[in-house]
């Protein structure tokens, strides 16, 4: 009894994938064109003889010809849209198709990165509308990570007051360390993936902007480097070296916070939630 039941389970597991791919058939047909060059025709064929409510199937990028060879075809609506990245949104588009004279639909479906087609098909003799989803997905995606960026100060000159005159010296601080949130576009199918990154740094006084390159490690650690736009204490242009000043003028008057561009390196981590957010 147990052996008979086990055979039924194995038969079901083996047979199900063949049913799934029998409903939607994706083919690549190679041939030789009139100019003697190799050509590849890509086709998608939907079989209406298998009753389903909905089905979803990934496909590779490219231009496909869609065929629905069936006399049972009653109606067809095709909607095209871009699959949204998690942090960013993209425009949505809609497309249409017409039913051929012999109830065989032939139209082109253009799949680029993150393209999704939703086909709503009405079948003669059925009240329900079938739903077919065909989509291509990019290996690249936006990843949000939290960490700290070290901004290296390339210019560290400051004004000071010496004997009631303006003098210039060098600030001992070489870098600013700022908490940051980074948005990185990288390939999540690889353990080591270069990519582009941008982000915001923040503390209690100012906001900084970062942009540059990144290296994702295991999707959860991101090393980044590039340029930062942030505030630093710089000589006030209202004064010049050697200028005679009143004793009431202090270093706070001789220098002021100004936005400057400097290089940075950073390390950030991808968490399942914002570590700086309020606890529930």
Image (cartoon, rainbow, N blue to C red):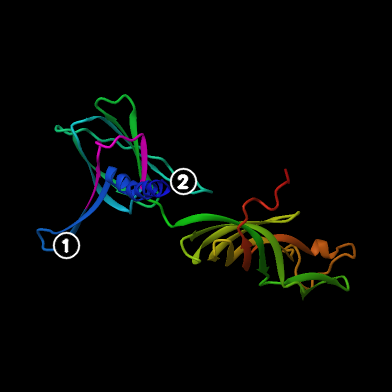
Residue identifier under label 1 = 38
Residue 209: x, y in percent? 62, 58
The circle on residue 55 is none
Q: Is residue 250 left or right of residue 156?
A: right
- Name of the residue lying farthest toward the left: 34
- Determine the CA span between mark 1 and mark 2: 35 Å
The answer to whether 98 appears left or right of 213 in the picture is left
Looking at the picture, how far across and down is residue 83, in whole percent?
A: 43, 45
Which quadrant of the view contains residue 173?
bottom right
SS assignment at label 2: loop
Residue at image coords 24%, 40%: 47
The answer to the question of whether label 1 and label 2 lie on touching residues, with beta carbons closer than 8 A, is no
Quarter of the image for the N terminus: give it: top left
| Residue numbers of the magenta segment | 42-57
The crowd level at tag 2 (other Cα within 10 Å; few <14, some 14-19, many 20+) is some
Which quadrant would residue 178 be assigned to in this image? bottom right
Check disc 1: other Cα within 10 Å, few if <14, some if 14-19, many if 20+. Answer: few
Question: In front here: 256 or 202?
Answer: 202
First along the sequence among labels 1 and 2: 1
Q: Residue at 16% across / 62% down in the picture? A: 38
Residue 196 in percent (x, y) is at 51, 62
Residue wearing tag 2? 84
Q: Nearer the viewer, residue 51 or 61?
A: 51
């Amino acid at each position: 009894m147990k052996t008979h039941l086990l055979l039924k389970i194995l038969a079901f597991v083996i047979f199900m994938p063949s049913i799934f791919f029998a409903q939607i058939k994706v083919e690549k047909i190679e041939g030789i064109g009139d100019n003697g060059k190799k050509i590849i025709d890509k086709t998608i064929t939907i079989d209406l003889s298998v009753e389903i409510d909905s089905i979803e199937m990934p496909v590779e990028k490219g231009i496909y010809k869609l065929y629905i060879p069936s006399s049972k075809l009653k109606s067809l609506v095709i909607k095209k849209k871009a699959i949204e990245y998690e942090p960013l949104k993209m425009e949505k588009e809609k497309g249409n198709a017409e039913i051929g004279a012999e109830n065989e639909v032939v139209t082109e479906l253009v799949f680029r990165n993150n393209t999704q087609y939703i086909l709503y098909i009405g079948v003669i003799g059925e009240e329900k509308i079938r739903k077919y989803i065909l989509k291509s997905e990019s290996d690249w995606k936006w990843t949000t990570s939290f960490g700290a960026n070290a901004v290296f100060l390339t210019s560290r000159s400051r004004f000071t007051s010496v004997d009631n005159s303006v003098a210039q010296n060098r600030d001992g601080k070489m870098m600013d360390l700022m908490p940051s949130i980074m948005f990185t576009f990288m390939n999540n199918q690889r353990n080591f993936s270069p990519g582009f990154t941008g982000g915001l740094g923040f503390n209690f006084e100012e906001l900084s902007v970062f942009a540059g390159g990144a290296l994702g490690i295991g999707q959860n650690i991101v090393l980044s480097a590039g340029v930062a736009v942030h505030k630093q204490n710089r000589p006030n242009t209202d004064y010049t070296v050697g200028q005679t000043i009143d004793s009431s003028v202090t270093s706070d008057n001789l220098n002021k916070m100004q936005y400057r561009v400097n290089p940075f390196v950073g390390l950030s981590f991808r968490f399942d939630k914002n570590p700086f957010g309020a606890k529930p």
